[in-house]
């Protein structure tokens, strides 16, 4: 499923979301091909405009519904850590619920470098591990978003604190889902591992640490790693392990663009829903909507920086093929974005290192630290998540600027 590449590489929740297919599998793409997906109000058709055949979805209070899902499934998978504050705050509340540790054994996270799993295990178990050491787990992943996320910075200490109040047999384990990567050894693009699959990796973790041990887990990844259906040439983590372990995973979609720009709070089909709520997809008109009505078309950029609108065939399937349920947090255009914590934004050494890693991707969007600081400040001016149409001219201009910078001679 082509759009999944947006979540496979260098996700940037507070900047433009962009990636190069296969960059983190080979880190060196023969052509400069970028897929950019910026949710856009008015691009995706809303349920008010087109309501397919199907029953009305039945919303339920979200936390009891998710806890009940663990009675039927081994794994509940939720999109997380992608800059959406409402989603991430909800997950922290779910984990704190007293019934959570009664039903769940493991929390498997996208924002965790599996190279540091032994350190993470010691920290989560309550051992004396310096925070500067354990934070390498999420600061040194392949994903830009992980090292700059307030949610990610909070979830690990939270689980550690919860474990201190639980008997040993009930303590939670956190599993790092990103493949092992030693950034100290990556000095250039040529040093990046030749094989780096961000779906096969977590699928193997799930098979080894969860399913084979008959444990129950909460998966927290970008939604495109979690879908049941996927492009056979680019499978999701869930679709990979479901070949051996089918019908054991309950996938919940983070909110899409199906409830945008309502003229009034009392308008629309979800006005009476509790917030937050969970609604099953199967057999409902909401589940019958195809993926393109939740997410707008993609944009491709060729090696000459020409920008093209892309309507993907893989999007022309009903949402119920991809996910089992939807989480609703109120009108899309009133949801909040997650701001970068000050301790990260002011860490000059780390931000310099992130800029170094970002530059190696071939499509750097950080720029100078001064430019990046200004983007953080601009983001703080409006706490709403916001969805805007892609400015194709600006995208092409940035592409040309990056090509010019990369071809400029290195100062002696």
Image (cartoon, grey):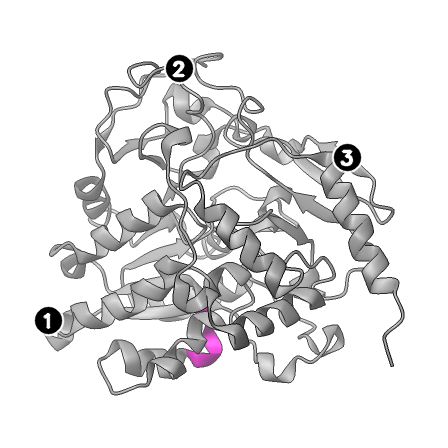
Q: Where residue 3 appears, x then y in whole percent?
A: 61, 43
Label whose residue precedes the other's in the sequence (1 or 3): 1
Look at the image and tell me whether residue 361 can be seen.
Answer: yes
Disc nearest the viewer among 2 and 1: 2
Q: Quadrant of the N terminus?
A: top right
Q: Observer-nearest residue: 125 or 133?
A: 133
Quarter residue 267 falls in: top left
Q: Are marks 3 and 2 in contact (CB under 8 Å)?
A: no
Quarter residue 215 falls in: bottom left
Quarter residue 29 falls in: bottom right
Label whose residue precedes the other's in the sequence (2 or 1): 1
**Residue, x 82% and y 63% (percent of image)?**
406
Q: Left of 148 or right of it: where is 67?
A: left
User: What is the distance, in whole Å, between disc 3 and disc 2 at their CAs?
Assistant: 31 Å
Q: Which residue is mark 3?
A: 308
**Residue, x 59% and y 72% (percent of image)?**
352
User: What is the distance, in whole Å, between disc 1 and disc 3 at their CAs?
Assistant: 54 Å
Q: Tell me the magenta residue range.
A: 112-116
Look at the image and tell me whether residue 212 can be seen.
Answer: no
Q: Where residue 222 appears, x then y in whole percent?
A: 47, 51
Label whose residue precedes the other's in the sequence (3 or 2): 2
Q: Which residue is mark 2?
A: 263
Q: Are marks 2 and 1 in contact (CB under 8 Å)?
A: no
**Residue, x 35% and y 78% (percent of image)?**
120
Disc nearest the viewer among 3 and 2: 2
Q: Determine whether the residue tagged by mark 2 lies in a helix, strand or loop.
A: loop
Among all residues in the image, which is located at the extreme bottom? 128
**Residue, x 27% and y 76% (percent of image)?**
124
Report the magenta stretch's main SS: helix
Q: Are marks 1 and 3 in contact (CB under 8 Å)?
A: no
Q: Which mark is residue 165?
A: 1
């Amino acid at each position: 499923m082509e759009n999944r590449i947006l979540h496979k590489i260098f996700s940037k929740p507070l900047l433009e979301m962009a990636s190069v297919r296969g960059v983190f599998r080979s880190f060196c793409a023969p052509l400069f091909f970028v897929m950019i997906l910026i949710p856009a109000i008015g691009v995706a058709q809303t349920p008010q405009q087109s309501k397919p055949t199907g029953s009305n979805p039945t919303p339920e209070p979200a936390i009891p519904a998710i806890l009940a899902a663990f009675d039927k499934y081994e794994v509940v998978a939720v999109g997380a850590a992608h800059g959406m504050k409402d989603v991430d705050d909800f997950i922290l509340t779910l984990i704190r619920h007293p019934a959570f540790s009664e039903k769940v054994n493991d929390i498997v996270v996208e924002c965790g470098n599996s190279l540091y799993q032994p350190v993470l295990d010691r920290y989560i178990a309550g051992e004396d591990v310096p925070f500067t050491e354990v934070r390498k787990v999420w600061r040194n992943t392949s994903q830009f978003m992980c090292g700059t996320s307030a949610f990610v910075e909070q979830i690990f200490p939270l689980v550690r604190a919860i474990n201190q109040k639980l008997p040993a047999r009930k303590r939670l384990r956190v599993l790092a889902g990103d493949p092992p990567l030693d950034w100290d050894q990556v000095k250039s693009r040529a040093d990046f591992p030749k094989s780096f699959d961000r779906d096969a990796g977590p699928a193997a973790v799930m098979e080894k640490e969860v399913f084979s041990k008959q444990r129950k887990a909460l998966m927290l990844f970008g939604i495109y790693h979690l879908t049941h259906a996927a492009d056979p040439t680019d499978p999701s983590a869930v679709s990979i392990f479901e070949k051996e372990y089918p019908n054991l995973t309950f996938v919940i979609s983070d909110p899409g663009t199906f409830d945008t720009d309502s003229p009034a709070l009392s308008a629309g089909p979800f006005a009476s829903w509790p917030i937050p709520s969970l609604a099953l997809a199967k057999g409902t008109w909401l589940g019958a909507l195809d993926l393109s009505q939740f997410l707008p078309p993609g944009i491709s950029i060729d090696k000459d920086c020409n920008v093209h609108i892309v309507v993907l065939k893989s999007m022309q399937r009903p949402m119920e093929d991809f996910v089992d349920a939807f989480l609703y947090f109120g009108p899309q255009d009133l949801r909040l974005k997650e701001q970068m914590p000050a301790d990260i934004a002011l860490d000059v050494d780390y931000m310099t290192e992130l800029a170094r890693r970002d530059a190696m991707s071939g499509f750097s969007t950080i720029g100078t630290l001064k430019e990046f600081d200004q983007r953080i400040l601009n983001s703080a001016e409006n706490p709403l998540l916001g969805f805007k149409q892609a400015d194709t001219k600006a995208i092409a201009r940035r592409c040309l600027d990056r090509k010019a910078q990369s071809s400029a001679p290195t100062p002696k």
